[in-house]
């Protein structure tokens, strides 16, 4: 009988794909998270390439994905995560009892392409070591309790497609460096923070596709983000304190969504706005005047809520001009 068990063990070890160092690290992570139900499949007597939450590379059999979400776990991100050196995807998401700061251990994961730490109770600053993860294409730190300023060094990530820092408690101004990405130009999501000051002029030097800076305390002009040569598609700056004249602004043909509500924007709506294929528009709660351009009638397809509470804006769908 014992001989048979020993033989079965030898057969299992011979067939197991999982790297022993990866398995050891994973079991340490499980222990650090107090053996949660979501990791019940992590049995040391089974192949870790078959475990839930993780995925092995088809050729090397090293752990390349760690995706833990919507789990009932408490504690902090385990330091043993650093012992999975081939990780390309790391996700801790919708874990409301995950606390502490973003650990230094993540700096060792230089193969990471996707890092998503969102919908948790992580706190503290955005660590500068994230700028060392040069293979990142997607960085999501949204819906946390992160504080402090946005580190300027984050713009040195050359392959970034999207940067989500929204829904935190970040303060200070937007760093000028965010207009100086040297590789790809990422979609920027900075909304629902406590950012102050003006939008850096440097952002006008790049061709962004998405900018969402809504629900902050930004001031001054941001009209330099527009222009017929730009490629911006979605621009959300609602609920700030922006103050500039919209009258002579020229919009790119690419623009499909524009939300500027609850600012201090003056002037009139440019005629060129009526030539765009806008799917969404809201300029309510500003200081705009004059007639809403008719053009092809596109601006009339939006309801009254897109235009209300301006100084003297008129014309359909608002009451006619006198």
Image (cartoon, helix red, strand yellow):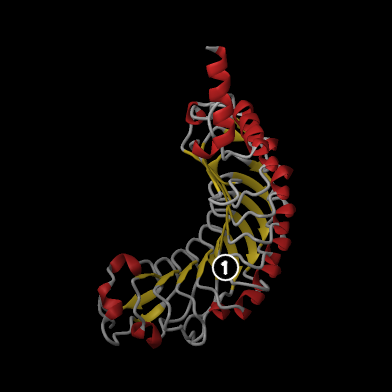
User: Which of the 4 image quarters holds residue 261?
Assistant: bottom left
Tell which of 218 and 232 is nearer to you: 232
- Residue 154 is situated, as x and y percent measured from the top left of the image, at 69, 61
Picture residue at 33% right of the left edge, 71% below the top? 279
- x, y percentage for residue 243? 55, 72
Quadrant hosting residue 213: bottom right
Q: Position of residue 7 (x, y in %)?
A: 56, 23
Q: Circle 1: is it few (<14), some (14-19), or many (20+) Cα within 10 Å?
A: many
In this rendering, the count of numbered labels is: 1
Q: Residue furthest top?
A: 1
Measured along the vertical axis of the image, is residue 258 above or below residue 269?
Answer: above
Asked if residue 99 lies left or right of residue 73, the reply is right
Q: Is residue 268 left or right of residue 2?
A: left
Q: Which of 201 and 220 is in front in this view?
A: 201
| Res 56 → quadrant | top right
Which residue is rendered at x = 57% and y = 40% of the image?
A: 17
| Tag 1 residue | 186
Q: Is residue 78 above or below residue 187?
A: above
| The one of 86 and 194 positioned closer to us in this rendering | 86
Q: Which of 100 and 42 is in front in this view?
A: 42
* Kind of element beneath mark 1: loop
Q: Give the image location of residue 127, x and y in percent.
A: 71, 50
> Does residue 284 appear left or right of residue 50 in this picture?
left
Tell me the quarter of the image containing the C terminus: bottom left
């Amino acid at each position: 009988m014992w001989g048979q068990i020993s033989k079965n063990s030898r057969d299992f070890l011979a067939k197991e794909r999982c790297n022993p160092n990866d398995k050891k690290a994973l079991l340490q992570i499980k222990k650090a998270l107090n053996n949660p139900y979501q990791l019940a499949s992590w049995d040391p007597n089974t192949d870790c390439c078959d475990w839930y939450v993780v995925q092995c590379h088809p050729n090397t059999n090293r752990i390349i994905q760690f995706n833990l979400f919507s789990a009932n776990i408490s504690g902090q991100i385990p330091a043993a995560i650093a012992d999975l050196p081939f990780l390309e995807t790391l996700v801790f998401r919708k874990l409301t009892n995950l606390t502490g700061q973003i650990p230094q251990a993540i700096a060792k994961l230089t193969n990471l392409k996707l890092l998503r730490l969102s919908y948790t109770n992580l706190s503290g600053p955005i660590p500068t070591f994230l700028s060392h993860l040069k293979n990142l294409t997607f960085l999501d730190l949204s819906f946390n309790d992160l504080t402090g300023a946005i580190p300027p060094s984050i713009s040195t990530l050359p392959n970034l497609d999207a940067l989500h820092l929204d829904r935190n408690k970040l303060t200070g101004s937007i760093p000028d460096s965010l207009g100086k990405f040297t590789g790809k130009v990422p979609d920027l999501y900075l909304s629902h923070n406590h950012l102050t000051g003006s939008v850096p002029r440097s952002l006008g030097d790049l061709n962004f596709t998405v900018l969402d800076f809504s629900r902050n305390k930004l001031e001054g002009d941001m009209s330099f983000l527009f222009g017929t040569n730009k490629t911006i598609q979605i621009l959300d700056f609602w609920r700030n304190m922006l103050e500039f004249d919209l009258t002579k602004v020229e919009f790119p043909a690419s623009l499909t969504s524009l939300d500027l509500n609850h600012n201090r924007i003056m002037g009139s709506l440019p005629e060129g706005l009526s030539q765009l294929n806008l799917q969404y528009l809201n300029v309510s709660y500003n200081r705009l005047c004059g007639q809403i351009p008719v053009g092809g009638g596109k601006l009339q397809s939006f309801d009254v809520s897109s235009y209300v509470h301006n100084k003297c804006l008129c014309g359909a769908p608002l009451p006619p001009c006198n």
